[in-house]
Amino acid sequence: MKALKYILAGILFGIVMTKSEAISWFRIQEMFRFQGFHMYGIIGTAVAIGVVAVALIKKFKLSDVDGNLIQFPDKAKTWARYIIGGTIFGIGWALTGACPGPMFVNFGYGYLVFIVVIIAAIFGTYTYGAVMKKLP
Amino acid sequence: MIEFLSQPWPWYTSGAVIAFIMLLLFYFGKTFGFSSNFRTLCAMAGGGKQSALFDFNWRDQIWNLLFLAGSIIGGYISSVFLSGNDAVAISEATINDLAVLGIGAPEGLQPAELFSWNALLSVQGWIALVGGGFLVGFGSRYAGGCTSGHAITGLSTLQLPSFVAVIGFFIGGLFTTHVLFPIIF
């Protein structure tokens, strides 16, 4: 049961990403060309609900399933990595039309060639780990 | 019911479900962040000897790998049981722009020109699939997160670093779309 809840959450994620067409390269292109509202609507709705829900979690000091207070630790304010790393990520996102989650959802959907994208991404993360000390 | 679910879901339903998943993971005592799995896989492969980034107890991240496994199953279920076989209904303007690049109008979820094994026989295919995948893996860890960790969770928790990362996502995506694509396609 402990394991199952994460698998079920993942299944829901896979279904919503597919049925919202957020795993589609076409939708990502439409987004980066500002020619459709669809992707902005998805992310905007998620964030709007998220902001309100997180504010309520903080206000009422809600706890998780284990009874621990749900906290939101601040991310380190080292700006170079966010803007440079984010830009590198964005180039890859537009090329593949998939961020990390959708790569796996696409593979499950039957676009098996995504295994190549996934292996390349693992190799990319591995390379970052090898060179990170030399980066700003 | 199945027919209803098989239609493409509207953006507001999808956004609400994604927010629900983020909140569910908070309730489980975890944080929604998919790209962390790449780091975990590197750690499992013994990357800890190469870099401190991979030197951690990856067993604490098994929950996220289960989530990953679920996402593959979710894609499969959508394809087999919930598929409306609809061509993605992108705007006419996008279809026209992509036609200029030699990419046909949608017939399914993905352009066959890019997401087939044959694509690996072309330079464009290698740039998009191998190059793009590499940059997503490299950039997500450099930036400390991807769309789920920064754009969804980070913005929901009002983290300025995540807002900066999302600006980066768009700088990169706009550059690729408007500068790189006309060159490589």
Image (cartoon, coloured by chain):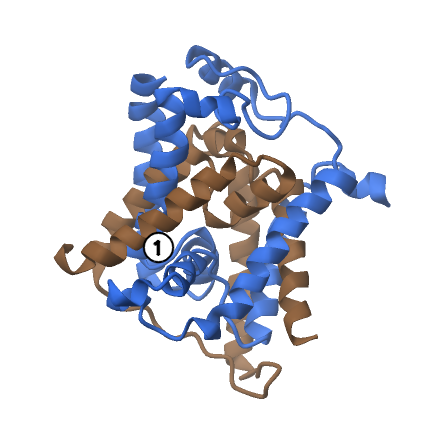
Chain colours: A brown, B blue
Q: Residues within 10 Å of mark 1 (few under 14, many from 20)?
A: some
- Residue B139 in the figure: left or right of residue A68: left
Residue B133 in picture, x, y percent from top left: 39, 40
Which image quadrant for residue B170? top left
Q: Is residue A28 above or below residue B25?
A: above
- The residue where tag 1 is placed is B163
Which image quadrant for residue B44? bottom left
| Residue B82 seen in render | no
- The residue depicted at 57 percent of the width and 17 percent of the height is B105
- The residue depicted at 58 percent of the width and 88 percent of the height is A67
Residue B175 in picture, x, y percent from top left: 30, 31
Q: Is residue B3 above or below residue B138?
A: above
| Subunit of label 1 | B
Q: Quadrant of the N terminus of chain B?
A: top right
Q: Amino acid at mark 1?
A: Phe
Q: Quadrant of the C terminus of chain B?
A: top left
| Residue B77 seen in render | yes
Foreground of the two, B52 or B23: B52
- The residue depicted at 67 percent of the width and 55 percent of the height is A12
Instruction: Please state the total of marks drawn on the protein image.
Output: 1
Query: Helix, strand, or loop for circle 1?
Result: helix
Residue B182 in picture, x, y percent from top left: 33, 18
Q: In the displayed orientation, state which residue is furthest to the bottom.
A: A67
Q: Is residue B113 above or below residue A61?
A: above
Residue A69 in picture, x, y percent from top left: 51, 85
- Residue B3 in the figure: left or right of residue A127: right
Q: Is residue A110 above or below residue A119?
A: above
